Amino acid sequence: ADKLLQELAGLVNDAVRKDDILGRFGGEEFLLVMPHTNATQGMAAAEKIRSLLANHPFPFAEKQPLKCISISGGVAEYPFHGLDAAGLLLASDEALYEAKRRGRNRCEVFHAEHPALK
């Protein structure tokens, strides 16, 4: 699993801009900070990364439930979805769980009307 995560991180790092910051955020979670990027651009980047990983010939990918390595992603934009790191993390995490609720292997942008926030 560690080798797969290293390969995944390398692919993502090669696919993003030099000013973007990628970091591992727990077991199988990654955080990508994209300065000077709005939610629409962030969503396009997340979708590009999701597609890149789904189409990459990872070892054992065919044994996964979707026959590929899939990711779910959540996107949040400063200052609209959070005014600090904690707020943005909360918003992007909620968007991530919305992506998982909607079937995984997809990305979602945070929306204030998500049921968990009412």
Image: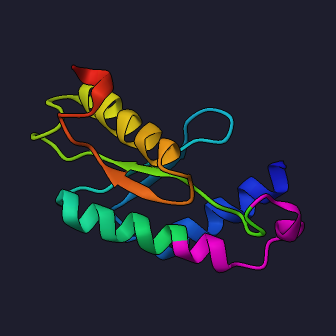
In the rendered view, tell whether residue 13 sits above or below residue 14. Answer: above
Magenta stretch contains residue 1: no
Q: Residue drawn at (17%, 37%), measured in percent from left and top?
A: 81
Direction top: furthest residue: 118
Q: Residue drawn at (23%, 55%), measured in percent from left and top?
A: 35
Give the camera-side residue of 16 and 56: 56
Q: Residue drawn at (41%, 63%), measured in percent from left and top?
A: 46
Magenta stretch contains residue 61: yes
Residue 113: percent from left, percent from top: 19, 34
In the rendered view, tell whether residue 110 sits above or below residue 47. Answer: above
Q: Quadrant of residue 4?
A: bottom right
In the rendered view, tell whether residue 105 sits above or below residue 74. Answer: below
Magenta stretch in the rendered image: 51-65
Instruction: Say whether residue 67 is left or right of residue 115.
Output: right
Direction left: furthest residue: 80
Give the camera-side residue of 117 and 20: 117
Instruction: Say whether residue 16 is left or right of residue 77.
Output: right
Q: Quadrant of residue 65?
A: bottom right
Location of the C terminus (image quadrant): top left
How many circles with numbers are drawn on the protein? Answer: 0
Residue 25: percent from left, percent from top: 55, 36
Residue 41: percent from left, percent from top: 24, 68
Residue 19: percent from left, percent from top: 33, 63
Residue 58 visible at all: yes
Residue 86 visible at all: no
